[in-house]
Image (cartoon, grey):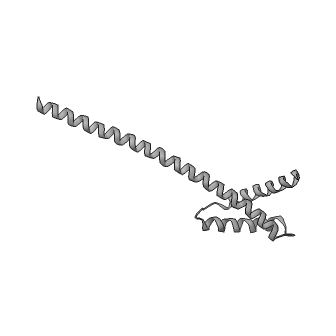
Amino acid sequence: MDVFLSSITQFAVELLVIVIGTLLTVALNKVRVYFNTLKQKDELGIVDAITDLMVEYTEKELKGKKGIEKRDFAVEKAIAILAEKGITVSKDEVIAGIENGVNKINKNKIEK
């Protein structure tokens, strides 16, 4: 009887370790996903801020230049600044951010 009780106890302990390990793995995975989501949101905010600043900077630096030349200048500067911060963003995303920044500036001009 003692051997039987010992086997059942060992099985119960092993089962408990497996269940707790599985629950901890799931919980840690959820935490990792949550922090990755926060990191992405933070990076998107940084990209938005940098592209907006580059639009304002470009408008001041390249007065009298054509739109495409300004856009390309702003895109190159924004990508360089983001790369310095360790944020890798595609050129298309930066172009979209620059165009969004131009729209914000134009909207502010209309409202004033």
Task: Give the left or right position of residue 9, taking residue 41 as reference.
Answer: left
Task: Give the left or right position of residue 18, taking residue 76 as reference.
Answer: left
Examine the image and state in which quarter residue 17 appears.
top left
How many marks are shown on the rendered structure?
0
Residue 19 lies, with reference to residue 110, above or below; the image says: above
Residue located 23% across and 35% down the image: 11
Give the x, y percent position of residue 68: 80, 65
Q: Residue furthest top?
A: 1
Examine the image and state in which quarter residue 78 appears.
bottom right
Q: Quadrant of the N terminus?
A: top left
Give the x, y percent position of residue 38: 57, 50
Give the x, y percent position of residue 79: 66, 65
Residue located 56% across and 53% down the image: 39
Task: Give the left or right position of residue 59, taking residue 94 as reference.
Answer: right
Task: Give the left or right position of residue 43, taking residue 22 as reference.
Answer: right
Examine the image and state in which quarter residue 58 appears.
bottom right
Residue located 25% across and 37% down the image: 13
